[in-house]
Image: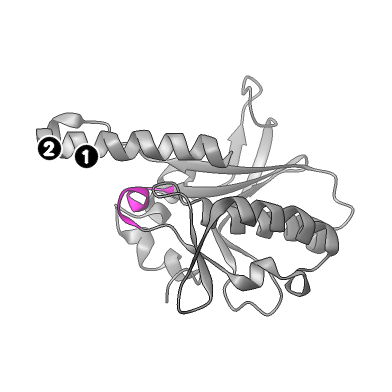
Amino acid sequence: KVGDGNELEEKMCAIRSSSAMTYNLLGNTEVTIKEENKIFTPGVYNVVFEKQLRTIKRSPRKANLDALLESEQELIFCEMKMTEWLFNKPGLVSENYLDEGHYFDKESYEAFYKMAQKIITNEVTDYRSYYGCLQQYDGVQMFKHLLGVYNYVMQEDKGMHKKVRLVNCVWELPDMDVLSEKCKEIYFEKLELEKKEFQEFY
């Protein structure tokens, strides 16, 4: 199945996968963030791989993040990209994301409806879904992840007063010498576009 949380079994064994990248970065124990860190709150974080979050009502597909790091002070949701950002096509936005009746509360609908309008085109597929307007950066997936994180904090952990972050880690090829000149050209075009579109999304 695609994106159903079973990545721990098969994909984590594939070195090219985001699941393997997540495991290689975080390991299989608690993660300690030290005092000198300038971004995240220092502390000991528990790690949950393939964290699934609800997005809209009656949707069989959940936002499937690669990992959640949780300490007493902070939640860090992680979306990793190994080679997917190079080869995969950005996702689609179902028309249900534009319908207030599918949201869990009015406030989230108002915010995410506005956001959806900025990341989709007017082109509709046969499945009543809209194409995303970004070509290389998967803003559609990150939009759904943001909604899932919002729902998690507001509904499943009401009253929780922790910092919340969504981190998008993207692997870049460390050794250009393995590529032909033509492949280097294509790679750098994709990389430049991915970074440009991330800034647009951000």
Asked if the magenta segment contains residue 58, the reply would be no
Along the viewing direction, whichever of 42 and 87 lies nearer the viewer: 87
31 or 100, which is in the foreground? 100
Report the amino acid beneath label 1. Answer: Ile
Q: Amino acid at mark 2?
A: Lys
Locate residue 111, reporting x and y percent.
75, 53
The image shows residue 127 at horizontal and vertical percentages of 49, 79
> Are discs 1 and 2 less than 8 Å apart at CB?
yes
Picture coordinates of residue 100 (x, y %)? 77, 69
Residue at (30, 58) in percent of width and height: 14
Task: Read off the residue under disc 2.
Answer: 182
Work out which quarter of the rendered image holds the C terminus and state it: top right
**Which residues are the magenta region?**
81-88
SS type, badge 2: helix
Near mark 2 (Cα within 10 A), the count class, few <14, some 14-19 or many ≥20, is few
Q: Position of residue 198 (x, y in %)?
A: 50, 39
State whether residue 2 is above or below residue 89.
Answer: below
State how many labels appear: 2
Which quarter of the rendering shows the N terminus? Answer: bottom left
How crowded pointer 1 is (Cα within 10 Å; few <14, some 14-19, many 20+) is rated as: few
Residue that appears at 19% across and 34% down: 185
SS for callout 1: helix
Residue 66 visible, this orientation: no
In the rendered view, would you say 7 is above or below 178?
A: below
Q: Which residue is found at the position 42% from the left and 56% from the top?
A: 19
Which quadrant holds residue 95? bottom right
Q: Which residue is mark 1?
A: 186
Q: Is residue 157 left or right of residue 84?
A: right
